[in-house]
Image (tube, rainbow, N blue to C red):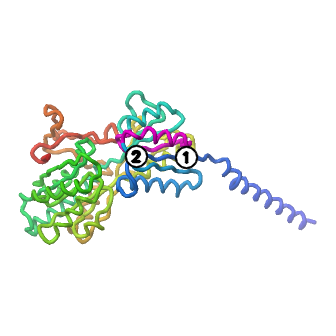
Amino acid sequence: MKRIYAISFISTIAVIIVAALFQFLVLDKRTQKHIKVGFVYVGDTSTVYTGNFVKAQNAIEKQYGDRVKTYAKYNVTEGNEGEILQELIDTGCELIFTTSYGFSEKTKEYAKRYRNVQFCQATGSNANEKPKLSNYHTFMGAVYQGRYVSGVAAGMKIKEMIKDKTITKEQAKIGYVGAYPYAEVISGYTAFLLGVRSVVPQAVMTVRYTNTWGSYALEKKCAMELIDEGCVIISQHSDTTGPAVACEATRGTKTTYHVAYNQSMEDVAPTTYLTGCRINWEPYILEAVSAVLSDKKIEDVVNANINGNDAGAGFERNWVAMLELNEIAVAKGTQERMEDAIKQLKTGKLAVFQGDYIGINPYDAKDTIDLNKGYQENKDSSAPTFHYVLKDVIQIK
């Protein structure tokens, strides 16, 4: 009888365990929140800027499975984002990511209109402006850090070229292809130059603007003009491979090397590409999705530097990433020098925008800044704010 009772007891326990597992695995799954998430892209997967966001979109689907369904709208021109936002809202999206600075104003307008939808604007700077909305957020990685470290790699190459007598110290000239004279672009190329000058103090820079984010022909043309002017390093804040292709075309003559943004250029510039950097959008986007799934405030979930409804971070939280090094082109010791700079940036021991420089606002010559006192980028916002052109060391064309 004892044996029968024991078997009966064990069977009962087994039934209870199976029932509990069923409750956990099946019933609980049915009650889990499911959401729709929309993305408004200014380009498509053929453009590196949008491609980095698509990586984050794919990461959502991988991490959350069928709990999240994503919708993407590609090649949305600035000015037409309103109708696209409405389409995503009508589809039932509870969370929408907009990815171009030019979408900021209209996105906030729709956030005011649809308070039950969370809107997250990448590279935006208006989340904390009036009216401040609980469902409108901005975010961006501290990309100036990556620019600085990229500059260190470029400086190491220039130092090697000077040592090998390929160039003289007076020929340490950098070219930069910039899209627009926005603070984001100015902050980036300034950080890049200061990274170079941490290795080669004599280095100077010439910047050419294209006034477009993505024109292969124009970006390549600007890069070729910079090369003709004697630049030995070309970098860019623009979206095509044009500048890298221009650099590779110099092989066999007076070689000019390339530093990239957003993607490796090793495939199109295998002998002249050095390295580059990009913003890693995944941490914020994954955590924002997690917040909406759990009905929590986004800023309470995101692991970042929070300022109101704005979030930003750098190397310390993996929001900025370096692209791979092209080992056949970079100078010896580059990896170690870059790692040291990243370590200092993570710990706050390296002040990028500081030195014996005077900066001039390109829109107001009376507005100047003395960098001996230093300037803390991203202090109050994730979007870059440094907008001064360094006197005597940066030339604009």
Percent from the top left, x then y, of residue 6?
86, 64
Residue 311 at what x, y percent from top left? 40, 42
Where's residue 387, x and y in %?
22, 40
Which residue occupies 57% across, 56% down?
Answer: 65
User: Measuring 52% from the left and 50% from the top, which residue is drawn there?
Assistant: 70
Q: Is residue 126 above or below residue 335?
A: above
Residue receiving disc 2: 76
Q: Amino acid at mark 1?
A: Lys
- The answer to whether residue 354 is magenta is no
The residue tagged with tag 1: helix, strand or loop? strand
Local crowd size for mark 1, using a 10 Å CA cut-off: few (<14), some (14–19), many (≥20): some
Q: Can you tell which of label 1 and label 2 is closer to the viewer?
A: 2
Magenta part of the chain: 78-103
Of 195 and 66, nearer the camera is: 66
Q: Is residue 318 visible?
A: no
State the image coordinates of residue 347 (x, y, percent, origin top left).
32, 50
